[in-house]
Amino acid sequence: MIILITGGAGFIGSHLCRRLLKGGNKVICLDNFITGSKENIKELLSNKNFRFIKHDISKSIKIKEKLNWVMHFASPASPKDYLQYPIKTLKVGTLGTHNCLGIAKAHKARFFLASTSEVYGDPKISPQPESYWGNVNPIGPRSCYDESKRAAEALTFAYYRQHKVNIHVIRIFNTYGPYMRIEDGRVVSNFIYQALTGQDITLYGKGVQTRSFCYVDDLIDGIIKYMKVDYPGPINLGTPFEFSMLKLAKKVKALTGSKSRIKYLPLPEDDPKQRRADPSLAKKMLGWQPRYGLDEGLNKTIKWFKEELKAC
């Protein structure tokens, strides 16, 4: 197959490029490097089945190759990034999604949207099933990301209903692993970087807010399985195992052997207090369930971070 991946030089996008190339597909990777990196795909550039296009998908583009899939993964995804680029985040979620859907429609290709658990906002029920509509502040500082993804889902289902575009929508829960940016602002990368460099490990509030963490290989497995199933979604891809930020910080300290202190900072506005995936639909529809426990996934990620820090 010939597959267009927007955000293909990002953390998750680059993993997806590798997996699809390994499966014998041709991949067109599109990225503008706002949060992605050419380093993430440097070894792929010599692959004859890989082509890179530097482009902002918020602006229109025509692809000459006959596409089988358009997979939209482009977006800032960490609070640090989308708070720095709120308008670009809104544009890639709305205009970018619209452009990708137009490409899919023109090529009669299947469309895959990488949405997020952030569509649930600060949830009032736990775990969060796909049927939950969420609790989102539409004008808060995080709304640029939350609402852009909610709008992206609405656009995708509008094309599904009106133009009969074949769609696949996933909601990604906190994913971590190699190829994360060292200082990208996400909690796992923050804690590992701080622990390995002897800095204070920064917790917000009292550290009692929770997340469920998914190792990137498990996420990619779920994406590949979903590509083989004809179901519009949305489908949660995340683990049901819930950890407090304080417990995660202590675990990272123990696994790295760090002597970093834990420092408490004020809780950011609208920071969700609880986040836990309900993956029962993914298990039922895809036969998917995570294989990696948190310790195993963290050890793999810590090893990668150590190698990156040595190279810096």
Image: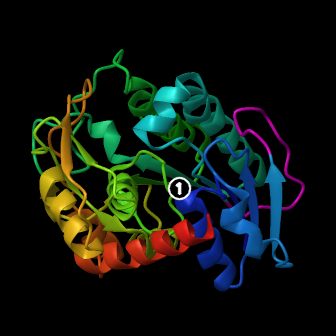
Within 10 Å of the Cα at label 1, are there few (<14), some (14-19), or many (20+) other Cα atoms? many
Residue 73 visible in the picture: yes
Residue at the (66%, 65%) spot, across then down: 40
Left or right? Give the position of 281 relative to 179: left
Q: Which of 121 and 202 is in front in this view?
A: 202
Q: Which of 191 and 49 is in front in this view?
A: 191
Residue 110 lies, with reference to residue 222, above or below; the image says above
Q: As shown in the figure, which amino acid type bears the numbered disc 1?
A: Arg
Picture coordinates of residue 214, whole percent (x, y): 32, 66
Picture coordinates of residue 28, whole percent (x, y): 77, 62
In the rendered image, residue 25 lying in the magenta stretch gets the answer no
Segment tinted magenta in the rendering: 55-69
Write down the residue under mark 1.
Answer: 181
In the rendered image, residue 66 lying in the magenta stretch gets the answer yes
Residue at the (35%, 74%) spot, across then down: 286
**Quarter holding residue 150:** top left
Left or right? Give the position of 205 relative to 70: left
Q: Judging from the image, what secondary structure is the residue with disc 1 in?
A: loop
Residue 229 visible in the picture: no
Picture coordinates of residue 260, whole percent (x, y): 25, 57
Picture coordinates of residue 255, whole percent (x, y): 25, 75
Residue at the (74%, 38%) spot, across then down: 56
